[in-house]
Image: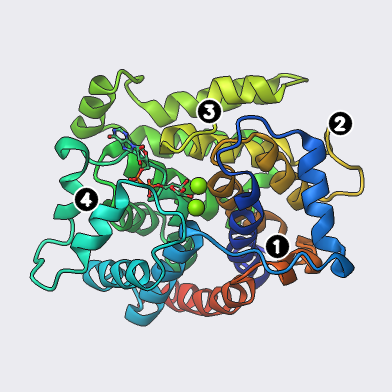
Amino acid sequence: GGSASLSRFRGALVAAVLGDCVGGEFEGAEEVPMESVLQHLNSLDDETKGTGILEYSDDTAMARCVVQSLLTRAGFDEHDMARRFAKEYSASPGRGYGSGVIQVLKKLSSPQLSDVYQPARDQFNGRGSFGNGGAMRAAPFALAFPDLADVKRFARLGAMLTHSCSLGYNGAVLQALAVHLSLQGALDLPQQFISRLITEMEEVEGDEVTRNDARILKEAEKPFCERLHRIRDLMERSKVSIEEVISELGNGIAALHSVPTAIFCVVHCLQPRECLPENYGGLERTIAYSLALGGDTDTIACMAGAIAGAHYGVEAIPQSWIKCCEGAEDADMNAKRLHMLYHQSSLGG
Ligand code: R7I
Ligand code: MG
Ligand code: MG
């Protein structure tokens, strides 16, 4: 489809859910042989096996809150979004939330709370979380706001409800930017796609707070920019092993060790790869490759899924995969609603 087409919106939201549901199988595994990944993915095709439904985790649970809030309020409303996070957590606390964020979600349910950003600021001795929980639910911001400045601003604020460390919320901004650009067709020119992300993140990471956090955590001055440069270096090489990707970019629960990794999975899988089946299309390759990295597989596949889905469109997703994943049909419906909101706002509202 064309730029910002309905198919791209549906692809983004549905593939994010798929990544989460399918990736849950390997979350936390240190090494995941490609053979196990393909076996798992093949079992989804095989209805006679009765794989049953794969449940979504916190990644999708929180993304659904973001979507519902953006749709209901026709824009960003931090109080409404915070309330939805808290309500969702108390209704289904067993979705695999990060161990720190649970404290925030409990505090957010208090009716006396006036500053909804305060519980997040109290995390980790006042420094805030750098986990990828803000980034994992950032894609819907790119589907709600056509304007790049809005995507950056609201993805940051939406993440800050739980992640007040710049390495947490800047990861959410990067993920939303990647989905935003992918929706416009920017992945047709992958090198330029990365360059544009670097240009944007130069500005995002240019502030005093980011510099300070990076110094305290002993990271490069602009940590996400530095990782994007590493992606560019990896892209220039003819062969890259999974071990190298993990050591250069990471596969962990920190936003810095997972958002750039998800972006790499997408650009790396734009073309056929030796380690992946020939009959796989780009979206299938992206999901399979994300899982084979091990570590935080549900979240990396969820984020890579959103970016890849926005590029390839919903038609690239195997029906048999959609059928196995809890919440995939809902995501498809919500994508249609977001598509309407997006094109309403672009008329100037
Ligand atoms: O970021 P968050 O919502 O977790 C998301 C992850 C995804 O993989 C989901 O699929 C789910 O499995 O969890 O939750 P947080 O609790 O804010 O952060 C996740 C973890 O990162 C924490 O439990 C810590 O182990 C670590 N972490 C930190 N450790 C030390 N200092 C995050 N921030 C810090 C920190 O500042
Ligand atoms: Mg999860
Ligand atoms: Mg995870």
Q: Is residue 128 left or right of residue 305?
A: left
When the figure is inspected, residue 222 is found, relative to residue 17, above or below; the finding is above
Decide which of 126, 32 is in the foreground and name it: 32
For marks 4 and 1 on the same chain, the one whose residue lies earlier in the sequence: 4
Decide which of 346, 51 is in the foreground and name it: 51
Circle 1 sits on which residue?
Answer: 313
Which quadrant of the figure has residue 249? top right
For marks 4 and 2 on the same chain, the one whose residue lies earlier in the sequence: 4
**Percent coordinates x, y for residue 329 in the rendering:** 64, 76
Residue pictured at 48% horizontal, 26% vertical: 227
Which amino acid type corresponds to the residue marked 2 in the rendered image?
A: Glu
When the figure is inspected, residue 192 is found, relative to residue 119, above or below; the finding is above
Residue pictured at 63% horizontal, 54% vertical: 19
Mark 2 surroundings: few (<14), some (14-19) or many (≥20) residues within 10 A:
few
Circle 4 sits on which residue?
Answer: 120
Circle 2 sits on which residue?
Answer: 274
Q: CA distance from mark 4 to mark 2?
A: 43 Å
Q: Is residue 253 left or right of residue 36?
A: left
Which amino acid type corresponds to the residue marked 3 in the rendered image?
A: Gly
